[in-house]
Amino acid sequence: MSRPPAALASDAREYGGAGLFGLLTPQGNPTAEPEMRILLPPRCSVLCARLTSAGDDLRRRLEDYFERLESFVDQFDGIGLDALGFACTASSYALAPAEERARLGRIEDSKGYPLLTAAGAVEQALRSLAIGAVALVSPYPPWLTETCRRHWIGRGLRVTATLQLPPASPARPIYGLDTRMLLARADGFDARGADAVLLTGTGMPSLRAIQPLETALEVPVLSSNLCLAWALAKLTGAAHAGPESRLYAGWSGRLSAS
């Protein structure tokens, strides 16, 4: 894949010398941007744009986000990004892998930089940790939780258990959740038989829950935003494990200051 000259000249950038990343996130998502800024290493810059849809139905919005992906990427115009992250895990669940890969490949060829989906980053992380069985913690409505479960089974994983979180409110079923609610519901969650626990979705805050859950459940705990940041960071530098996460660490100080 060819890359624009601006993407190579990281030492000449005013900002983002260690990585310049674009981020596409659903229009009502209040979580993906702040978590990505915390997770990515120092001297990385994140430029954000919104995935928008006039659809009243969540299914329709998720379809719109991917069907109109090229137009959303075009919002970054000619900026020489190192990569672009698509921070909507659920838009990938109903897509055939070949269909998603073909669409991403066309955009990458046109723009000259990699495009990583949150679901693809989760899959990368699962392979990196040699995970064969997962327990899911889902903030989605039940129909989408089932679509998520089928997605990961279709990727060759065994799903040992699913924790369905209750909606925080009718108007904001996912985006109104917080760490306190997550930890309270996950207390006593039976993750036996799982190689990892996956906190699904980019809209639910996850960072303050990862280390306590890893300690309690004694397996790696992954989230969509954690995996997407790890996959982006790997493109321009090292991404290592540590006390915050068995996948990707180094961000606890930034989290404490947020």
Image (cartoon, rainbow, N blue to C red):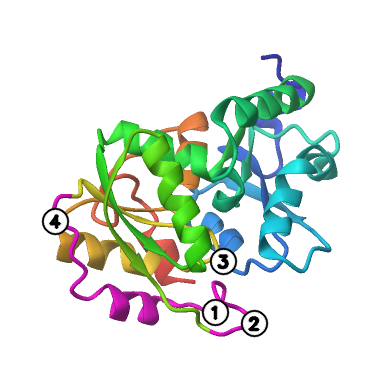
| Front: mark 2 or 1 | 2
The answer to whether marks 2 and 1 mark residues whose Cβ atoms lie closer than 8 Å is: yes
Q: Relative to 6, is 231 above or below?
A: below
Q: What element carries label 3?
A: loop
Residue occupied by mark 3: 31
Q: Which of marks 3 and 1 is nearer the N terminus?
A: 3
Residues under labels 2 and 1: Cα distance? 9 Å
Residues under labels 2 and 4: Cα distance? 34 Å
Q: Which of marks 3 and 4 is nearer the N terminus?
A: 3
Residues under labels 4 and 1: Cα distance? 29 Å
The answer to whether marks 3 and 1 mark residues whose Cβ atoms lie closer than 8 Å is: no
Residues under labels 3 and 2: Cα distance? 16 Å
Q: Relative to 166, is 77 above or below?
A: above
Q: Earlier in the sequence, mark 2 or mark 4?
A: 2
Q: Relative to 55, is 85 above or below?
A: above
Q: Is mark 1 on a helix, strand or loop?
A: loop
- Whether residue 130 can be seen here: yes
Which quadrant would residue 174 be assigned to in this image? bottom right
Residue occupied by mark 4: 192
Left of 6 or right of it: where is 139? left
Residue occupied by mark 2: 171
